[in-house]
Image: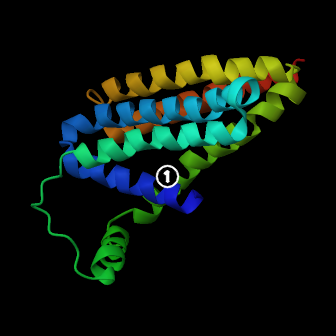
Amino acid sequence: MAFCSASQDIVFDAYKTDLLAAEERGAGAAVSVLGYRLAMLVSGGLALWLADRYFGWQATYWLMAGLMLIGVAATLMAPEPDDSIPAPRTLEMAVVAPLRDFFARNNAWLILLLIVMYKMGDAFAGSLSTTFLIRGVGFDAGEVGLVNKTLGLFATIVGALFGGVLMQRLSLFRALMLFGILQAVFQHRLLAVGDHR
Protein backbone atom coordinates (compact mmCIF):
# COMPACT_ATOMS: atom_id res chain seq x y z
CA MET A 1 0.00 0.00 0.00
CA ALA A 2 2.85 2.41 0.86
CA PHE A 3 4.55 1.62 -2.48
CA CYS A 4 1.33 2.37 -4.38
CA SER A 5 0.81 5.59 -2.43
CA ALA A 6 4.36 6.81 -3.08
CA SER A 7 4.11 5.85 -6.76
CA GLN A 8 0.81 7.71 -7.11
CA ASP A 9 2.37 10.78 -5.48
CA ILE A 10 5.25 10.77 -7.98
CA VAL A 11 2.95 10.22 -10.95
CA PHE A 12 0.61 12.99 -9.80
CA ASP A 13 3.54 15.42 -9.47
CA ALA A 14 4.67 14.52 -13.00
CA TYR A 15 1.10 14.95 -14.27
CA LYS A 16 0.86 18.43 -12.70
CA THR A 17 4.20 19.38 -14.24
CA ASP A 18 3.11 18.21 -17.70
CA LEU A 19 -0.39 19.71 -17.53
CA LEU A 20 0.20 23.11 -15.91
CA ALA A 21 2.06 26.05 -17.39
CA ALA A 22 5.05 27.31 -15.39
CA GLU A 23 3.09 30.26 -13.99
CA GLU A 24 0.25 27.94 -12.84
CA ARG A 25 2.41 25.48 -10.90
CA GLY A 26 2.44 27.43 -7.63
CA ALA A 27 -1.36 27.51 -7.51
CA GLY A 28 -1.45 23.88 -8.63
CA ALA A 29 0.84 22.87 -5.77
CA ALA A 30 -1.36 24.78 -3.31
CA VAL A 31 -4.52 23.06 -4.51
CA SER A 32 -2.88 19.62 -4.42
CA VAL A 33 -1.70 20.20 -0.82
CA LEU A 34 -5.23 21.32 0.07
CA GLY A 35 -6.67 18.11 -1.38
CA TYR A 36 -4.01 15.99 0.30
CA ARG A 37 -4.63 17.53 3.72
CA LEU A 38 -8.41 17.26 3.43
CA ALA A 39 -8.00 13.61 2.46
CA MET A 40 -5.79 13.10 5.52
CA LEU A 41 -8.51 14.62 7.70
CA VAL A 42 -11.22 12.41 6.20
CA SER A 43 -9.17 9.20 6.22
CA GLY A 44 -7.63 9.91 9.62
CA GLY A 45 -9.77 11.90 12.02
CA LEU A 46 -13.18 11.32 10.44
CA ALA A 47 -12.53 7.61 9.88
CA LEU A 48 -11.47 7.14 13.51
CA TRP A 49 -14.54 8.99 14.73
CA LEU A 50 -16.92 7.02 12.49
CA ALA A 51 -15.33 3.69 13.42
CA ASP A 52 -15.46 4.48 17.13
CA ARG A 53 -18.94 6.00 17.32
CA TYR A 54 -21.05 4.55 14.53
CA PHE A 55 -19.92 1.93 12.03
CA GLY A 56 -17.02 -0.10 13.39
CA TRP A 57 -13.83 -0.73 11.44
CA GLN A 58 -15.11 -2.97 8.65
CA ALA A 59 -17.86 -0.60 7.51
CA THR A 60 -15.53 2.39 7.87
CA TYR A 61 -12.92 0.72 5.64
CA TRP A 62 -15.62 0.02 3.05
CA LEU A 63 -16.65 3.67 3.21
CA MET A 64 -13.04 4.84 2.76
CA ALA A 65 -12.64 2.43 -0.18
CA GLY A 66 -15.83 3.87 -1.69
CA LEU A 67 -14.45 7.39 -1.34
CA MET A 68 -11.42 6.27 -3.36
CA LEU A 69 -13.80 5.86 -6.31
CA ILE A 70 -14.04 9.67 -6.43
CA GLY A 71 -10.30 9.81 -7.15
CA VAL A 72 -10.59 7.06 -9.76
CA ALA A 73 -13.45 8.91 -11.50
CA ALA A 74 -11.52 12.20 -11.40
CA THR A 75 -8.48 10.47 -12.91
CA LEU A 76 -10.53 9.00 -15.75
CA MET A 77 -12.13 12.39 -16.51
CA ALA A 78 -8.90 14.42 -16.19
CA PRO A 79 -7.49 15.89 -19.39
CA GLU A 80 -4.47 14.29 -20.98
CA PRO A 81 -1.31 16.42 -20.89
CA ASP A 82 0.18 17.81 -24.06
CA ASP A 83 2.00 14.99 -25.84
CA SER A 84 4.64 17.22 -27.41
CA ILE A 85 7.23 15.54 -25.17
CA PRO A 86 7.75 11.99 -26.44
CA ALA A 87 7.50 9.17 -23.92
CA PRO A 88 10.80 7.42 -23.15
CA ARG A 89 11.22 4.19 -25.07
CA THR A 90 13.55 2.38 -22.67
CA LEU A 91 14.19 2.20 -18.95
CA GLU A 92 17.58 3.81 -19.58
CA MET A 93 15.89 6.81 -21.23
CA ALA A 94 13.32 7.03 -18.44
CA VAL A 95 15.61 6.69 -15.41
CA VAL A 96 19.34 6.76 -16.16
CA ALA A 97 19.40 9.60 -18.71
CA PRO A 98 17.51 12.11 -16.50
CA LEU A 99 19.79 11.29 -13.55
CA ARG A 100 22.87 11.69 -15.75
CA ASP A 101 21.49 15.02 -17.01
CA PHE A 102 20.79 16.24 -13.46
CA PHE A 103 24.23 15.37 -12.08
CA ALA A 104 25.96 16.90 -15.12
CA ARG A 105 24.64 20.34 -14.08
CA ASN A 106 26.63 22.79 -12.01
CA ASN A 107 26.00 22.50 -8.26
CA ALA A 108 23.80 19.40 -8.65
CA TRP A 109 25.12 17.95 -5.39
CA LEU A 110 24.44 21.23 -3.57
CA ILE A 111 20.88 21.28 -4.89
CA LEU A 112 20.38 17.69 -3.78
CA LEU A 113 21.84 18.50 -0.34
CA LEU A 114 19.51 21.51 -0.04
CA ILE A 115 16.48 19.35 -0.83
CA VAL A 116 17.47 16.64 1.65
CA MET A 117 18.29 19.08 4.46
CA TYR A 118 15.15 21.14 3.83
CA LYS A 119 12.90 18.09 4.08
CA MET A 120 14.87 16.47 6.90
CA GLY A 121 14.11 19.30 9.31
CA ASP A 122 10.44 19.14 8.41
CA ALA A 123 10.34 15.36 8.77
CA PHE A 124 12.10 15.36 12.15
CA ALA A 125 9.96 18.20 13.48
CA GLY A 126 6.79 16.52 12.25
CA SER A 127 7.60 13.11 13.69
CA LEU A 128 8.70 14.47 17.07
CA SER A 129 6.17 17.28 17.50
CA THR A 130 3.56 15.26 19.40
CA THR A 131 6.13 13.89 21.85
CA PHE A 132 7.62 17.35 22.30
CA LEU A 133 4.25 18.99 22.94
CA ILE A 134 3.26 16.35 25.51
CA ARG A 135 6.57 15.74 27.32
CA GLY A 136 8.44 18.96 26.64
CA VAL A 137 5.73 21.59 26.85
CA GLY A 138 3.25 19.74 29.08
CA PHE A 139 0.06 19.59 27.00
CA ASP A 140 -2.15 16.54 27.40
CA ALA A 141 -2.90 14.18 24.50
CA GLY A 142 -6.42 15.56 24.00
CA GLU A 143 -5.14 19.12 23.63
CA VAL A 144 -2.45 18.04 21.18
CA GLY A 145 -4.95 16.02 19.14
CA LEU A 146 -7.44 18.88 19.01
CA VAL A 147 -4.86 21.48 18.03
CA ASN A 148 -2.96 19.27 15.57
CA LYS A 149 -6.04 17.94 13.83
CA THR A 150 -8.01 21.20 13.65
CA LEU A 151 -5.84 24.28 13.97
CA GLY A 152 -2.80 22.50 12.54
CA LEU A 153 -4.77 21.37 9.50
CA PHE A 154 -6.27 24.84 9.06
CA ALA A 155 -2.81 26.45 9.32
CA THR A 156 -1.42 23.98 6.77
CA ILE A 157 -4.24 24.71 4.31
CA VAL A 158 -3.87 28.48 4.71
CA GLY A 159 -0.09 28.15 4.39
CA ALA A 160 -0.40 26.05 1.23
CA LEU A 161 -2.80 28.52 -0.38
CA PHE A 162 -0.65 31.48 0.68
CA GLY A 163 2.44 29.73 -0.67
CA GLY A 164 0.68 29.15 -3.99
CA VAL A 165 -0.19 32.85 -4.25
CA LEU A 166 3.32 33.87 -3.19
CA MET A 167 4.84 31.61 -5.85
CA GLN A 168 3.32 33.98 -8.42
CA ARG A 169 5.53 36.78 -7.04
CA LEU A 170 8.72 35.00 -5.91
CA SER A 171 10.98 32.51 -7.58
CA LEU A 172 10.97 28.97 -6.25
CA PHE A 173 14.44 29.39 -4.76
CA ARG A 174 13.53 32.60 -2.92
CA ALA A 175 10.32 31.07 -1.60
CA LEU A 176 12.20 27.99 -0.34
CA MET A 177 14.81 30.15 1.38
CA LEU A 178 12.23 32.49 2.93
CA PHE A 179 10.01 29.74 4.31
CA GLY A 180 12.94 27.55 5.33
CA ILE A 181 14.31 30.40 7.45
CA LEU A 182 10.86 31.20 8.88
CA GLN A 183 10.33 27.53 9.72
CA ALA A 184 13.68 27.35 11.52
CA VAL A 185 12.94 30.55 13.48
CA PHE A 186 9.49 29.40 14.59
CA GLN A 187 10.73 25.95 15.56
CA HIS A 188 13.52 27.56 17.56
CA ARG A 189 10.95 29.74 19.35
CA LEU A 190 8.84 26.66 20.10
CA LEU A 191 11.91 24.95 21.54
CA ALA A 192 12.51 28.00 23.74
CA VAL A 193 8.94 27.68 25.09
CA GLY A 194 9.66 24.06 26.01
CA ASP A 195 12.88 25.04 27.80
CA HIS A 196 11.05 27.50 30.04
CA ARG A 197 8.46 25.02 31.32
Q: Is residue 158 above or below residue 98?
A: above
Q: Is residue 18 above or below residue 32?
A: below
Instruction: Name the residue: 72% across, 41% down.
Output: 127
Callout 1, which amino acid?
Answer: Ile
Residue lying furthest left:
84
**Which quarter of the figure has residue 189?**
top right
Q: Give percent across and percent down for residue 40.
A: 56, 35
**Which quarter of the figure has residue 33?**
top left
- The answer to whether 90 appears left or right of 114 in the picture is left
Instruction: Name the residue: 77% across, 22% down.
Output: 144
**Crowd band around label 1 with a 10 angstrom C-alpha radius: few (<14), some (14–19), many (20+):** few
- Residue ID for mark 1: 115
Instruction: Name the residue: 34% across, 29% down.
Output: 164
- The answer to whether 89 appears left or right of 123 in the picture is left
Mark 1 element type: helix
Front-most of residues 155 and 117 = 155
Q: Is residue 93 above or below residue 196?
A: below
Q: How many marks?
A: 1
Q: Is residue 112 above or below residue 41?
A: below
Q: Give percent across and percent down for residue 142.
A: 81, 19
Front-most of residues 156 and 72 = 72
Q: Give percent across and percent down for residue 168.
A: 26, 28
Q: How is the image coloured?
A: rainbow
Q: In the picture, which quadrant includes the N terminus?
A: bottom right
Q: In the picture, which quadrant includes the C terminus?
A: top right
Instruction: Name the residue: 65% across, 28% down.
Output: 45
Front-most of residues 109 and 33 = 33
Q: Give percent across and percent down for residue 15.
A: 28, 52
**Which quarter of the figure has residue 148?**
top right
